[in-house]
Image (cartoon, coloured by chain):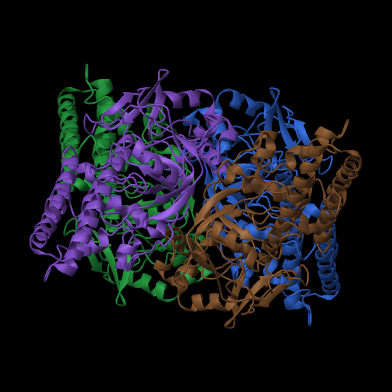
Chain colours: A blue, B green, C purple, D brown
Amino acid sequence: MDTILQHYQNTRNYTQTICNPLKIEDYTPQSAAFASPPKWHIAHTTWFFEEMILKSFYPNYIVFDSEYSFLFNSYYNSIGKRIERHNRGLITRPSIDVIFKYRAYVDKHMTQLLETAADPEVVKLTVLGINHEQQHQELLLTDLKYTFSLNPINPKYTDHNLIEATNTESGWLSIQEGVYSIGHNTDSFSFDNELGLHKVYLQPYSISKALVTNKEYIEFIEAKGYQTANYWLDEGWYWINHNAIDKPLYWVKIDATWHHYTLSGLKPVNPDAILTHISYYEAAAFAFWKGMRLPTEFEWEIASENLNWGQRWEWTNSAYLPYPNFEIAKGAVGEYNGKFMINQMVLRGASSATSKNHSRPTYRNFFPPQTKWQFSGIRLAK
Amino acid sequence: MDTILQHYQNTRNYTQTICNPLKIEDYTPQSAAFASPPKWHIAHTTWFFEEMILKSFYPNYIVFDSEYSFLFNSYYNSIGKRIERHNRGLITRPSIDVIFKYRAYVDKHMTQLLETAADPEVVKLTVLGINHEQQHQELLLTDLKYTFSLNPINPKYTDHNLIEATNTESGWLSIQEGVYSIGHNTDSFSFDNELGLHKVYLQPYSISKALVTNKEYIEFIEAKGYQTANYWLDEGWYWINHNAIDKPLYWVKIDATWHHYTLSGLKPVNPDAILTHISYYEAAAFAFWKGMRLPTEFEWEIASENLNWGQRWEWTNSAYLPYPNFEIAKGAVGEYNGKFMINQMVLRGASSATSKNHSRPTYRNFFPPQTKWQFSGIRLAK
Amino acid sequence: MDTILQHYQNTRNYTQTICNPLKIEDYTPQSAAFASPPKWHIAHTTWFFEEMILKSFYPNYIVFDSEYSFLFNSYYNSIGKRIERHNRGLITRPSIDVIFKYRAYVDKHMTQLLETAADPEVVKLTVLGINHEQQHQELLLTDLKYTFSLNPINPKYTDHNLIEATNTESGWLSIQEGVYSIGHNTDSFSFDNELGLHKVYLQPYSISKALVTNKEYIEFIEAKGYQTANYWLDEGWYWINHNAIDKPLYWVKIDATWHHYTLSGLKPVNPDAILTHISYYEAAAFAFWKGMRLPTEFEWEIASENLNWGQRWEWTNSAYLPYPNFEIAKGAVGEYNGKFMINQMVLRGASSATSKNHSRPTYRNFFPPQTKWQFSGIRLAK
Amino acid sequence: MDTILQHYQNTRNYTQTICNPLKIEDYTPQSAAFASPPKWHIAHTTWFFEEMILKSFYPNYIVFDSEYSFLFNSYYNSIGKRIERHNRGLITRPSIDVIFKYRAYVDKHMTQLLETAADPEVVKLTVLGINHEQQHQELLLTDLKYTFSLNPINPKYTDHNLIEATNTESGWLSIQEGVYSIGHNTDSFSFDNELGLHKVYLQPYSISKALVTNKEYIEFIEAKGYQTANYWLDEGWYWINHNAIDKPLYWVKIDATWHHYTLSGLKPVNPDAILTHISYYEAAAFAFWKGMRLPTEFEWEIASENLNWGQRWEWTNSAYLPYPNFEIAKGAVGEYNGKFMINQMVLRGASSATSKNHSRPTYRNFFPPQTKWQFSGIRLAK
């Protein structure tokens, strides 16, 4: 088993690996308010270790640059003013070579601290920082894909486009009614929103062993799914009409054939691959059209040990709300999850862009229902 | 016990009673996209009986005016084109005297039908129409209050301003953990979203017997509640800052004293009265500041038989989502509830503006979290 | 020749005449930020006489209602706070019967004052108030038409729809180059923006004796005028595409025939009638397509004595800017014109909705280039 | 005198000189819809030579990259689809090293063409391309300043910040009334909007020999200029209030002292330097407060030979409209100026950021009245 230091270094190195195919220009732009520039991701994850650990636990630590606390803070209101989120793409200076020096500087000090420190609080916060960086590794990829997709020349990132997975199972899994245990127990790492273990009563249900494929979704499109009001939530119907949405994100029809932008450029849609880049609204409309529904997050969690999952974040029909006895941690770390518990839906599982060792059955991902730029997919229940 | 005809007539008459203090000018304006003009409420509730019942069940029924199907439809996409919601306030013609003729015409035919018909479908739809009209009776009052509040001369509607109720109990009610039954059984009327009866596991909890008062909320204001980020959900913090909100709806400070616009004009705020006209965001922030939380809708329902309620719609910490086995009815009636099940929070109870015989413990009201124009209030749990 | 009192009374009575076909409901709604409710027009014109004359010149004058100064002020920033322009349609109280009492009250006092007063300042301000009311008479009609047009049942105001005029002349009028006198001399009434008389050098030009007809404009539509970028100003091209504009205001095609909403209801477009309800952008694009241009306001003024005009406000290619030596009057009256001298284009002439005795060759009307709800038209020059 | 080839090469080299202090990251971001990234400026100016000259006049010319026609077109609708203006900042690929190869490729071919070609059309279009590039040189600086200003660390571009100029003259210049000649004669280069020479009648006027200084403008601020409605055009008053504007662009008060962001970083405002970065609205309000006015563009042009100018673009009180006999050229080149002739005000002169040999007394610059990011200033007239 890896030491905490090895775990730290592996994670930090993997962020670097993700950046290898990038050109200097690619680090700066921000293509939407919900996305961030690569530079910001790699600086912000570094800032987390400096702000939350080194400043408090490394004796006489000298910050790399006092302005970074402002520049690379994300949403931690308790740590002072931060740059307007939509202006992150204008931070050309500090330039990327300086940011990599910042990473090296923080890594050097973290390494020293982890080699020597036995303070369990340091270990705990380092694990949190590692998980935080892993989340940003996935966002780095999804944000980069979104930015590249808006460039008319369809830039290629790598050969590995993360969307070609197919189902390996089919049919339905049936679960009995009863009182079940939900949530994380505290022995291994989890985010605060997965705590604590509590009981939930479930009615009997069936859940699909396979995720919805591109082919199935094309059938929905061809059945006038986007033109039929009563398949849709009222907000979803408004949303698709107001934004002229009639296909998944990144899809475009060229000469009667569906293509989509992928991280390896523009490609034909593979009918057998698992559908991705759809919103909750689309997932719910598709399920309604099928005469089925999406599972709740509790149904998903209980079924998960007998499911194949990990290729797509799976929309559930559960709103992102606190578990019983949810407690918000004191200080800035407490801003991590709780304050987002409104107007978001829970996604369960993991995707092909999720970093290794980051997923678990109790993990609660969450996004507003119009979100499409994540590698999201649909699993049906009934 | 009332016959269905008496029930129908009482309800229809009560809508007229609400309108008695109005001047002709008051019937037309629409003050916000979420509100509707009085004329629209009284025509739309009439349209419901004509469209859903008379057209199908009254032999050879001749519609009062074929254009009303378009003018006074609300959100039933399956019944053809409808007027843009935000343009309802421009419908000066048909004038209000014609609309009252429309009501009389439909009432005459409904009376004939109810006097003779034994068709249980007619009875069932009539009960639905009555409950629908009762919902609009409450909206008529809340929408009128909102419109009047934007008139700088603070018009008076009646002496009865609906906001002076005080608590009659105090302290906490404790509930044991266990599996409880939630939802409506089908013997009496309910909306589809309350069905069907199902089991829910609840952890042990305590719920306040009293609602939050104006005095308690003023303490929150004076404790810089609106200026302290970490009391707030992130969306709520953005919302109060973006809209410069620092007090409940209708409140204004005059010479260091809080006043509020009421249906009987501008009045000083009574510290002992129960707080009202606050959003979910404010309810959640207040609860956080108190070190407590809002109850879930299930906790509320189980506790309800031992609570005093009915003065305020009480925000719960439950998102408006389908119960297990929720089924959407066929046709236009099926659009009533299910399609709004996203980005809304459940309110339980009833308010001083709710029509008599309309409330019950299983009733699920729902609004987006920024909603304030309803007579909403706060009950704490822990 | 009329006395000032007769002139006053005739004007006030004519406003009443315009209102005769209205129902009480029609007085309240405001259908756009640029339009005002009838109630507001008739109260505001009354307010002008009370605020500008009676308060200063009628001995011991008691205002009808002290709140009206706030409610019915328009854009005179120097006279204190005013109601948000877009909320004018919510002022159901005071009701219209009270407003007519307000008119009667002010009329009584104005009559007394004009019967006795010899103060030339009173006469001067009364003439200004009369002209002000005449402007609002035209706006009353254009705003009412706009509101009615948004009602799907196409209400009818009167049989007289103001748009059937045809050209009585054809051909071109040629004007020699030279130095000409422009502007109003001060013997009769004018607005401050027409002063003072000054010299302008004009190049030789020709100006059409006829205005563009519906038939000619339909040719432009059929020649793909709305689909051809290079006919349009860049802002105009953006505007028509962003707002999906491809025909004049109020036009709709029914079964391959152009119809338009008129004050006497929905009617087929008469090809021979003079085109109206077009924006400056459309006028400029049409002229470009014809290989011609719009006249400047100076060219128009010099040619006007040999032109037939008065059916349409004619867009000119002049921006609304101060004449040399333009002076802004002291006090609130000074806010009448000068502060609007940016981003507006001058229209010259008068329309079929302009009140009698209100037009003159030096009159400078002005609106932003997207304005369509006035009875505007096109005269070409080359 | 320079040959056309020397002129071409000097201009192209100067663009490179402007870019020398930039880091690779600086080339990409776009900080506002009205601004463009440096990469775009240097590619677009190159595209102009390729598209307008090489494609037509260089025998068998092979384009550098066929996608650039789409990527680096600006507003020439006749040359096919173009990238959304607000997405220019997302074009990370092609990277900047490729763009410099593109410049070298086009320069090589242009040099060959200019060394050999005697076609006067080539010379004429090359001169147009040179002037076009000079315009973009100025925009490159103003856009860069705007982007840098939004970075909280106040990046420094060079020591030369372009804003320290002071007046060298004072007092007033008086001009007699009469008929004057305005516009460019065709012997040397001009844009189409300066043509042709025509007569204008001017009333007698006086024009200031000096431009308004920072000190004078601070007096306006301290005299509550931004809080006094009647100094302002109505649109301007709305604009400053809606956008919370109470000082020139880039100004910030630190410890009671005015500072401003400059191209050499954050600096104290020099009271004696000439004011810059103000909108037309602010220029007009300042002039009104002074009891004066802005000159018209004709007054400015006639006075210009006896004025010191060239430090600031000077707002005039003339709208940007066509001169008599203005003709739009055929094809894409014709889109250069004419289609912007609405809702813009003319600025005359030149600024410290204007490229050498680019200014002349007949030059008509133009921007919407809220524009501030240019080096604009105020000259008074009366």
Q: Quadrant of residue D11?
A: bottom right
Q: Quadrant of residue B197?
A: top left
Q: Residue at x 84, y 70 (%)?
A: A105
In front of the other: D117 or D355: D117
Reply above or below: C346 against A69: above
Residue D251, horizontal then vertical, whole percent: 60, 72
Q: Is residue A103 found left or right of D175 in the rendered image? A: right
Q: Is residue D114 found left or right of D336 in the rendered image? A: right
Quadrant that contains the N terminus of chain D: bottom right
Residue C116, horizontal then vertical, whole percent: 8, 63
In front of the other: D154 or B113: D154
Q: How many marks?
A: 0
Reply above or below: C60 against D180: below
- Residue C113 seen in this snapshot: yes
Q: Quadrant of residue B120?
A: top left
Residue B347, horizontal then vertical, whole percent: 39, 52
Q: Residue at x 61, y 39 (%)?
A: D327
- Residue B225 seen in this snapshot: no
Reply above or below: C27 against B99: below
Q: Is residue B172 found left or right of C138 in the rendered image? A: right
In front of the other: D378 or B267: D378
In front of the other: B135 or A305: B135
Reply above or below: C325 against B340: below
Residue D175, horizontal then vertical, whole percent: 53, 65
